[in-house]
Amino acid sequence: MRNLYVLLFLLWTGKSVLAQEVDRSVPPVPGKAEALKLPEVKSFTLSNGLRIFLLENNALPLIQFQLMFNAGSVFDPADKSGLSNLVFDLVDDQTADRAPEAWADALDYLGVELESFSRAEQGGIRLFTPLSRVEPALDLLAAMLLRPDFPEGAIAQKKQSQLLRLTQEYSNARLLAAQAMRTLLYGKDHPLGKRFAGSKKSLEAISRTDVLEFADTFIRPQNAYLVVAGAIGEADLQALLEPRLQNWTGGQWHALAIPPPADTVHYKRLYILDVPEKQQTELRFIQLGPGAATEDYFAVQVMNTILGGTFASRLNLSLREKKGLAYGAASGFYFPSAYGYFVAQANVKGDVTGVAIRAFLEEFEGMSAVSTDEFERALSFLTNSFPKKFESLQSSAEEISRIVCYGLPHDFLCTYNASLQQLQLEDIKSAAARYILPQQMIVLAVGDRATIEAQLRELNLGPAAVLEVWDVLGDQP
């Protein structure tokens, strides 16, 4: 009987709560975001000169190592593009004392992830390991650095694999657009404009001597730094690294020195990259932007969040939700050490290419007016999403690596949200006026010329230059 009374009481109180009127015309007010408190990034230097940066995180018994070198594709010789990519593709396959099969078996046995990679400005090696396996895992990392092996057969095999991947780019409109926009913006011979993975001609020109010289020059402790994030303290980390890496020595720091691009001033210059019978068009709107250390970094981030940085941004709402021209439209800024770029993009049906271009240009012009509500929502989005940068050990290591690479203030992450909160609406308008310049943008349409050329003429934006696939990628392998 007592349980029955309790049940009746709960039903009555629940009914009274549900009966209360709720004003559904007013959205709920979000609570105040708590300040993100980051642990201190500790640093020390090994006897061989390798700089170590440690973000201790004991939430789980895991550790992420990220060893970074100033050794990306911008350091490739002019006639041997793809060399950095090839070297870092080789370095994690075997060592002088372990053939590829034995190397793969060692990684599988330990259950660790050990891989190398190459970017435009940097190359690197990642190691992700449970704390319980950290010592044998570091033994493998040390073997990669102290006893690398680049046999002729492995080089030939990697080059052949790369040529096969390059062949696929000739029919992939998205990859074509990515390469074409960099070539048009920087120039085909510029370090940021060339094909990072190389071409048939450049890969064939790379010899084993080139591979050995590149590795010996750039994969050295004096040209590197190591970021560690995870469940380990400074003293224990130093005790693990010093004996394993003390004999890995030499090298020098190779500063990132990106030269100015070629002539990049265009007056709404149109380009068509012809892909016959392509049903859709890849659109790109590009122009030069700031480098990583720009004082406008935070204003640019807020401004781009309003323009095209999220699903609810202006570009996506216009082209997807209002006009139904694309599944999505977005924009963003690429921040290398210098001479970055802005790009806005969408994939649209070929027969609405002209309408879509006009829609993009209208949104660019409209950035001269930004409302207080848009500003506050963008600010809130960036502030509340900032902790996601640290949701994994790898993303944490990436954030610290960026600070070291570009010489950003050591407290950049700790003051990130405070820097956002200091912005005013006028700062956002100024950033738009400075970096969103539709009169100077290169407009690139990758698609069927027969379908889109007449549409571009109707825009009255000037003549369109026509490119063929081989103008961008060279002769097909």
Image (tube, rainbow, N blue to C red):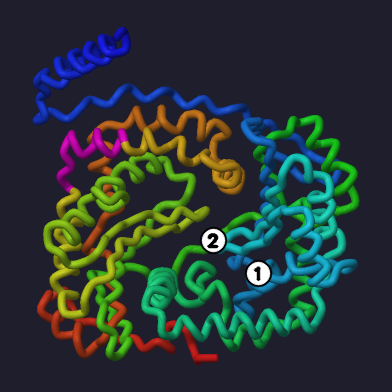
Relative side of 189 to 419, left or right: right
Main secondary structure of the magenta stretch: helix
The residue wearing badge 1 is 84
Does 216 sit left or right of 87 as displayed? right
Residue 231, horizontal then vertical, whole percent: 69, 34
Decide if residue 322 is in sight here.
yes
Alpha carbon of mark 1 to alpha carbon of mark 2: how far?
16 Å
Residue nearest the viewer, comparing 316 with 203:
316
**Label 1 secondary element:** helix
- Res. 62 image quadrant: top right
Query: Is residue 26 located in the magenta-colored stretch of the structure?
Result: no
Residue at 23 percent of width and 11 percent of height: 9
Question: Is 401 on the left or on the right of 140, as rendered?
Answer: left
Q: Is residue 197 left or right of residue 439?
A: right
Q: Which residue is mark 2?
A: 258
Where 138 sits versus 269, above or below? Answer: above
In terms of sequence position, does the residue under pointer 1 or pointer 2 come before the other? 1
Rendering coords of residue 80 (x, y %): 63, 79
Residue 140 position by quadrant? bottom right
Count the labels in the image.
2
Q: Residues within 10 Å of mark 1 (few under 14, many from 20)?
A: many
Q: Residue at x 73, y 61 (%)?
A: 218
